[in-house]
Structure formats: C-alpha cells, structure tokens
Amino acid sequence: MHDFEYNASGELCCGALPLRAIAEEVGTPFYCYSLPTLKRHIRAFEEPLAGIDHQTCFAMKANSNMAVLALMAKEGLGADVVSGGELFRALKAGIPATKIVYSGVGKTTEEIDMAISSGIMMFNIESSEELSVINERAGVLGRKAPVSIRVNPDVDPQTHPYISTGLKKNKFGIDIEASVRQYQAASRMANIEIVGIDCHIGSQLTDIAPFIDAIERLKTLISDLRRLGIGFSYLDLGGGLGITYSTEQPPHPREYGAAVIEAVKGLDLKLVFEPGRVIVGNAGVLVTRVLYRKETAEKTFIIVDAGMNDLIRPALYNAWHEIVPLEKKSGPKERVDVVGPICESSDFLAKDRDLVRLGRGDLIAVMSAGAYGFTMASNYNSRPKPPEVLVDGERSCVVVRRQSYEDLVAGEVIPDEMFERGETRCSQVR
C-alpha cells in the first residue's frame, strides 16, 4: 500500500501534493518519499509482533536517508548496519547503539573498533577469522564484544540469485554444520560474549515457507548448543520479506508475523527482525523527465534524464518497476524501451514496456523506488546524485539536496608539483 495516487485533475500526487509541483521546484530527476506511507508500513510490520519480545532493526542498506532513519528512531526501531558509514548515520539520526546490529562479511578493524566503542547490541559474525579479529580488538579496547553467529541454513529463498544469501554457495554466514564448532570456539574467547544466533536467507522473498524452513533448522541447532551449555538471548531472523513491484503476491506482514510466532514457540528468545524493502520500497518513487523520443526500425526509445547511476536495479537485476506518467493519459499504448543518458547499453529503466505515448518534456514516475534506489546511486559519467524529497500531506522538504558540479570534485587535488617537469604519467611519479 502506498500514498501515490492520481487526484481529480489527473495529476499523480504524493499525498495531497502533485509531483509536478515538486519537479518544478527541485528539477528532475528526484526521489520522493511519503512520510505517512513509511509510518503505515512500520506499524503494519510491528503490530503483528506486539505480543512477543522483539526488536526490529531497519536494514539501512535499503534506504539510509537521515530523515527516514530519524523516523525509524522515533518509532522505536533500531538499525541493521553493514558499514562504518551506516553505523555513523544511524547514531547521528538518533538510533541508540543498543538497538544496532552490525552485519556484513567484510568489517574492517576501524569499523569493528567503532562498533565496540559505541556499545552496539551485537555483531553478526560471518567467518571464523572475523570472530578472532573481533576478540582481539575487544581485548585491545578493554571491552567484551557481543556477538551472534550468522548461520547459513542452506535454504533456497526462491529469489533472484544476486539477492540470495542462505545457500551454501553464497558468501554469507557459516555453514550450519560448522556452526557448533564456531560457537564452541567463541565460548573459549576471553573478550567475546555470545548473545545470539542469526540467520538471513535472502531478499525480496514472496513465500513464507523458506523463512519457516530456516527457523526449523535453527531450532535443532539451538537445542544442540544448549545441550553443550551454550546459551544466548537473541534469535535474529534477518529480513527479506518482499513487496509488490509487478505481479508478485508476497505475504502480508500479518501472515509473516503469525507464522514466525508459531514457529518459535518455546524457544524463550528475544526475536530480532531486519526488514528493509518491505518498509521503504513502496514508500518512494523516482521522478524523471523525457528528454527525447528516438524511433528506429527496430525500437522506440524514450530517453529520460534519470539513468542507471540514479536507479541501477533494472540494469543489475533486470528488475521491474512500474512506470506511470505524472499526467494521466488516455489513448493507445506503444511498446518502448525507457532508457537513460548513460553511455552503457545496460542503461535502461524498462524494456519492451507498453506505455501511453510519451514525448519531450513529459514527466514520469518510476514506482516502488524507495528501497535500493538512492542508496545504490553513483556519480558514474560524472553525474550529480539527485535530491531526495520527503512529503507529508501538502508539505514537502528537500532532505538531501541535489549535488552540484562543485560537489563532484570536492576533495580532489591536482598535484601541480608532479607536473612541473611535464611528467604527466603515473608511472613516471617517483
């Protein structure tokens, strides 16, 4: 459910505000998020879990906008972070360190130190070597590091292979068969406190069954660990619940919550959830303007001012996003490719899409762009990143301004002293 609808005048709005009005103010392309939709999605996820001891930690990889994070903090959510930068953002936005889980396979020494010093809830451990490093750093800092081990249950999440994380061939987690030995090793480390067990099998899941399969495998492991005298407080079930982009029919959070609560009965553990896409995905759109029509013998191209640097999901996953005009149109449809200005053949937002005829200057919205949109944006082709706008009813606020050309070169240096003798090749620098 989202807050982007046509009004009586046929204008696509976010709440009561026509998106065209925002385009006139900030230019295109831009991201727009609906504050009421974000609130509604948070509460839709939380309400089915109200009867159990749990902590929801928003997966910041989906959307790390500071205003969005501040809302998460206000609603009582924590954060699932995968970098020092995400940890910094979460703390800066007001999310307590005690509600932050640090995941990810490649934590650096500096990031580990930052997390330990901040007093986070726990690290999700992805490898034996990482565990050893965290033990070492905790000792240097005179602290105990709270950890859970990310167990790879080898469950097929039935999603795109690029966003599957729970199979043996994936880089994430520790094989369920090896995890007992890893827990035993952790229990002998002087600076490690075992506080939980973690599992995350993938993203954009549209069926509850893989979640429940993973829980059943974890329950057996938890029993084995308890028999060995290894106990803990948290069961982190990760995230991954999907949304509707096109024809998908993912379970409602209510169904998901009921199934999980039933599956974990008797474990007596505090549950941790890490939703991302399900909260922000349909709460945002990317608005872009048609620059040109280009008709060839084979194809009709609609060339817009947003490219794969702004929204890479179609190029990366062949992901499907609905595309609608900001001004409601009638008439026959034509089959087109919607492409951007980037000098890559993979620069497209939609291929072979049946759309009402679009022409130069028309504005369109790329729907369901609130997750993995701006967070994956880049400056490829030296293109400034777009602004992000938050809307509440008739009010809007630019929460991230559009980058300027000056922003693109901020921090760069031309070392004049290296060129004084005309030595312009890197290989000549000594």
Image (cartoon, rainbow, N blue to C red):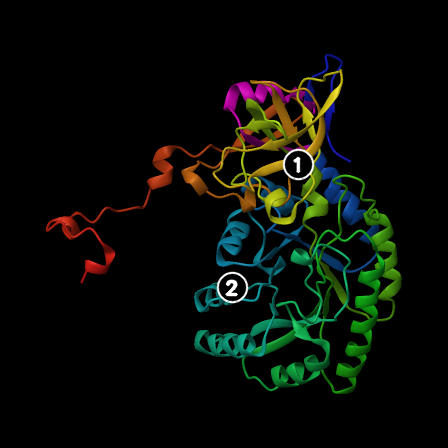
Is residue 54 something that shows in the picture?
Answer: yes
Residue 235 percent location from the top left of the image:
74, 67
Determine the CA span between mark 1 and mark 2. 43 Å
Q: Which residue appears farthest toward the top when viewing the image?
A: 9
Task: Give the numbered dot on residue 395.
Answer: none
Along the line of sight, the residue nearer the viewer: 160 or 407: 160
Question: Can you tell which quarter of the image residue 208 is in?
Answer: bottom right
Question: Can you tell which quarter of the image residue 221 is in?
Answer: bottom right
Disc 2 target residue: 115
Disc 1 target residue: 351
Three-letter amino acid code at the position of disc 2: Ala
Three-letter amino acid code at the position of disc 1: Lys
Is residue 50 something that shows in the picture?
Answer: no
Q: Residue at x 54, y 74 (%)?
A: 130
Please tell me whether mark 1 sits on a helix, a strand or a loop: strand
Quarter holding the C terminus is bottom left
Q: Residue at x 55, y 30 (%)?
A: 30
Q: Is residue 277 left or right of residue 375?
A: right
Q: Is residue 295 left or right of residue 393?
A: left
Residue 296 percent location from the top left of the image:
59, 26
In this rendering, the answer to whether 401 lies above or below 175 is above
Crowd band around label 1 with a 10 angstrom C-alpha radius: few (<14), some (14–19), many (20+): some
Quarter holding the N terminus is top right
Please tell me whether mark 2 sits on a helix, a strand or a loop: helix
Look at the image and give the residue range highlighted in magenta: 13-35
Q: Residue at x 61, y 72 (%)?
A: 147
Along the line of sight, the residue nearer the viewer: 55 or 310: 310
